[in-house]
Amino acid sequence: MSRLMLFFLVSYSFSFGVELETLSSKSGSEIQAIILKVDGDTVNLRRSDGVSFQVSVNIFDDVSREKIISFQNSSNDNNLKTVLKESSDIEFEKINEILGNKLFADFSLWDDDPKAVAYRLKWPKESRTEYSQSFRFYPPPEYKFASVRPYSAALYGDNSTTTGVSLVFANKGDCFASAGAGEDHFKQGEVTKDIKILEDWIERDEENINQIMVSLLGRAKRQNYGQGSAKRKVSRWDWAGHSFLLSVAEGEFVSLSIETTERANDRGRARKVADMHIRKIHRGNVENRSNGDVVIKNIPMVDQGPKGYCVPATFERCMRYMKVPADMYLLAMAGSTGLGGGTHTPTLVQSVQKEVWAAGRTFKPLKGHPTLKELKRFIDAGIPILWGLHSTEKFNDLANDRTSRRKNSEIETWRKEISDASKQIRNLQKPHLSEARHICIIHGYNKQTEEIAFTDSWGENYKERWVGAVEASHYSQNNCWVIDY
């Protein structure tokens, strides 16, 4: 830790009144320190000069041990009142200073336009629909937030106001990602696959973030957050209508999210949206183009980055579109995703089913790969289809070429080309069952040309691509699902 950071920690400790405990050893020596964490028979302390260290609880006298035990019990008490600081005590500039980023322009993030917040943070756009927008940054190693490197930083909002911030630090996806983003994520990167290293990174990041937050806002409140497979214990700090939630999933990830205190008080539970209301919205999302294309608009993009998180990222997209809260990192955990990616889809499907039902929707598999007629029924109602396929190099080359050339083609000429290609591909061998397994969303069709439109979780450049319906069936794993009403 740098001397400058130590100075900040010490300054914040005294400026904002974080409580220093007087602890006495059995030999009579005294020390004034902040109790940071109690882990079994050891306690983490920070002296008044900013130096942190770990010692055995047994070296202290009976009175001091009672203080330490009291801290441990209060940290585990869900009803413990958070040590809060009022807006007048901590200026927003001080929050920005210790976070190391210009997150706040004043005392409320929640009335800021997401574009303005993203501009301050220099986080690029991930998605924009008629109802929502998001910005996501996969930063370089030197980038820090709260003095710790985040691997993924995301900002969420509606069309005019910010609704949340999420930073994911050490995690089993990004820390073990493959060689590239988009189509290149199937390539194997040169990273370690040692789970012990990940555990050490998670422990390190948790401790560092916790220390920063304690130095700024005092002791955290421990509470449950989320529901179903997303339910977990979080450490919570409140400031001026904002709740900072530190979440640690053993062997999975460390995250820091910023939510409204109202949502934190509600423990992140989903609020059901009436079917009648959402049906109307989804029917309005169906765009009928002059060339015969029928496409669902307003499906949020989630960029999985260079890791193999296509399954959880795609499920998040569909769930959020259907007004079911979701996060790809939590879904990856529920789906037993391996280091760097690779989700056990049946496990994730079981988990998603519960989440969807809890939000008042239904989740069901389709029987094999749907025909164009079956696709039409769902697309016309504004319901996207989760599609399992073999995203081979040949398939992606085909999709990229078709998507580019169809824009300037006459309908009759193009229809004949798709028909000829469909006859040819029937004679080709299907991909091997284990080859380039992937999942994306079918969100459109053209009845005249017999094509389907699909969207990948690889960023805005992959939000709409086209292939023939017969070609799609050839590359399909014959596994498809829908979230319905």
Image (tube, rainbow, N blue to C red):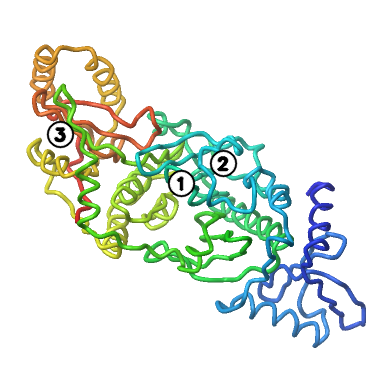
Label 2 sits on residue? 117
Res 225 seen here = yes
In this image, 109 relative to 32: left or right? left
CA gap between label 3 and label 2 equals 43 Å
Q: Amino acid at mark 1?
A: Gly
Q: Residue at x 57, y 56 (%)?
A: 199
Task: Please tell me the numbered disc located at residue 473.
Answer: 3
Which element is circle 1 on?
A: strand
In this image, 58 relative to 163: left or right? right
Q: Amino acid at mark 2?
A: Val
Label 1 sits on residue? 157
Q: Residue at x 24, y 44 (%)?
A: 386
Q: Residue at x 80, y 82 (%)?
A: 64
In percent of width and height, residue 320 lies at 34, 50
- Depth check: 248 or 446 in front? 446
The answer to whether residue 274 is above or below residue 96 is below
* Residues at discs 3 and 2 in contact (Cβ within 8 Å): no
